[in-house]
Image (tube, rainbow, N blue to C red):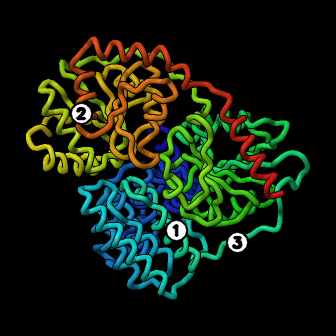
Amino acid sequence: MLGRLLGDLLGGGRPERLIAQGERAFDAGDYPAAADHLSRALARIPDDDPRRTALELRFAISLQECRRVPEAEELLRGLLARNPNLAGALVQLAMLRFMDSDADEARRLMDRYVARHADAGSRFKRALMLPVILQSNEQIDRLRKQLERDLDQLAAERVKPLAHPEGEVLLTQFYLAYHARNNRNLFRKLCRTYRMHYKARTDIDRRAFAHGSKLRIGFVSSYFHSHSVGRTTYGLIRDLPRDRFDVRVFAIGPHNDAMAHAIRIAADGYAALPADVERARAAIAAAELDILLFADIGMHPVTTFLSFWRLAPLQLTTWGHSVTSGIDTVDYYVSSDAIEPANAQELYSEKLLRMPGYFLPRYQRPPAVPAAAGRGQRVYFCPQTLFKLHPDFDRALKGILERDAKGEILLLGGTPAWEEQVRARLARTLGDAASRVRFMPPASHAAFLAQIAASDVIIDPFHFGGCNTSCEALALGVPVVTLPSFQLPGRFTMGLYREMGLDACIAQSEEDFVDRAVRLATEPERRRLVSAQILERAAALFDRPDTGRILGEELLRLAESRR
């Protein structure tokens, strides 16, 4: 505070200086500093200053990026009260409402925008604004039909094409992965519709082994840091055999943490790239890769739209986001033979590569942690983000609470609007038992692990379960009850158990899921025996260097066939 006062006395508090500082911070992505400078500037300029609207809009965006959402929303609504058709405010408030899972208002706001702007980006954005928190299977089917209609309309329209889709569309098909449906045909249709409005090169005149006996492979992601994608991909980057591979990493908007550092030093070449498709594309193209592996498609707009370009003769993706991409320039999906069902190819637009076994990455085993203090209740913890909670899972929650009068369901809290919508759904589907559902507030990773350790049972949600979290629970000896789904996102925990040679926690039906969870929680000796077996065998899940070797052999085979 004293430094700010001294700065103001020395001229740092002049509006022009504060505006310049705020805009520099905004452009650099330093949103806390931008919010501070812009709020002080706005306090010093009159209401009729012509700069005020643009500054308030940037201030609102800065507030939203700082997770000061109520303040951002109030400011945006004030801007629209003065100018109902202010383009930037309409789009920004629509995004805010979408992220709060209020898709109805988000689309109404976008309707006001698209009525005056004939561009493909805003129409794709509107089409992808679907609820984050789902209420029923009927709603899911209705939403998917609505998206199909929107894509048909987009295919028939002549509008301004996409130039910078990462900013113009901004959204991806991410949340569709949680519908528990086969997404192959819908995602293919989305790709075809994008191609009508986005001119990306789909061919390349270079063959594999362009640089001699070594294959030059690139890994690209926006999540090469302490994130599930970074943890999943690190082992591949580190362990691909260097006598046959030259490994390059392309980190989009990189972070600076321990995992990011490990990935950087494991690579033969590392490029920190901006969150800009054109600049990232140019850098990757200049590397003249033989193979490009997208560690995740659908999780971030930059890498999603990068994958529409043919940047290497052979392009692959894997289970950073564990559903098909639908994109015709992605040739293969790298997965696990031990997890995929027999008919799995029907779920992928890519050709499925079924690596032997579970195809585990080089995970580090988390250290033992002291359990969090108990509450006198038996705790069934579902440690997954709320948008993973499919409506089908409610039946299992109800069954557990009906069978165990002393049991409580613990869910992860977080975004207040999501929590409110889940509460409302559970009140409808669980009835009085909903009073025994509580939400864990946001906490450190250490506190999160302590809560896992203190739980009686971890329950894997239908139909998109845990992978990293299941590894962590099993490392701590806590049983994870799972019901395998028909596709990859709901089969990871089953794969972990298969790798350990255990099946006591793999259910065969919803009723069996409830029975296994309740018996583990209410029969101490059963839980102790299962926990001991898990602890005895969990080492098989961690720090395995064979994944990179296995992938390397398969990539060499593919490249040789295309030489």
Per the image, label 3 sits on a secondary structure element best described as: loop
Say which residue label 3 marks: 201
Which disc, if any, is residue 514?
2
| Labels 2, 3: front one | 2
Q: Nearer the viewer, residue 178 or 281?
A: 178
* Residue type at the position of mark 3: Arg
* Residue type at the position of mark 2: Val
Say which residue label 1 marks: 188
Q: Earlier in the sequence, mark 1 or mark 3?
A: 1
Quick one: label 1, few (<14), some, or many (20+) residues within 10 Å?
some
Quick one: label 3, few (<14), some, or many (20+) residues within 10 Å?
few
Compared with 360, 26 (above or below) is below
- The answer to whether residue 280 is left or right of residue 525 is right
Seen at 18% across and 18% down, the residue is 376
Residue at the far front: name it: 342
Per the image, label 1 sits on a secondary structure element best described as: helix
Q: Nearer the viewer, residue 377 or 333?
A: 333
Q: Earlier in the sequence, mark 1 or mark 2?
A: 1
- The answer to whether residue 274 is left or right of residue 140 is right
Q: Quadrant of residue 444?
A: top left
Q: Quadrant of residue 484?
A: top left
User: Where residue 188 sits in the image (x, y, percent)?
Assistant: 52, 68
* Residue type at the position of mark 1: Arg
Seen at 13% across and 33% down, the residue is 402
Position of the N terminus by quadrant: top left
Q: Nearer the viewer, residue 519 or 78?
A: 519
- The answer to whether residue 501 is left or right of residue 392 is right
Report the Cα–Cα distance between label 1 and label 3: 17 Å
Per the image, label 2 sits on a secondary structure element best described as: helix
Q: Nearer the viewer, residue 402 or 169?
A: 402
Quick one: label 2, few (<14), some, or many (20+) residues within 10 Å?
many
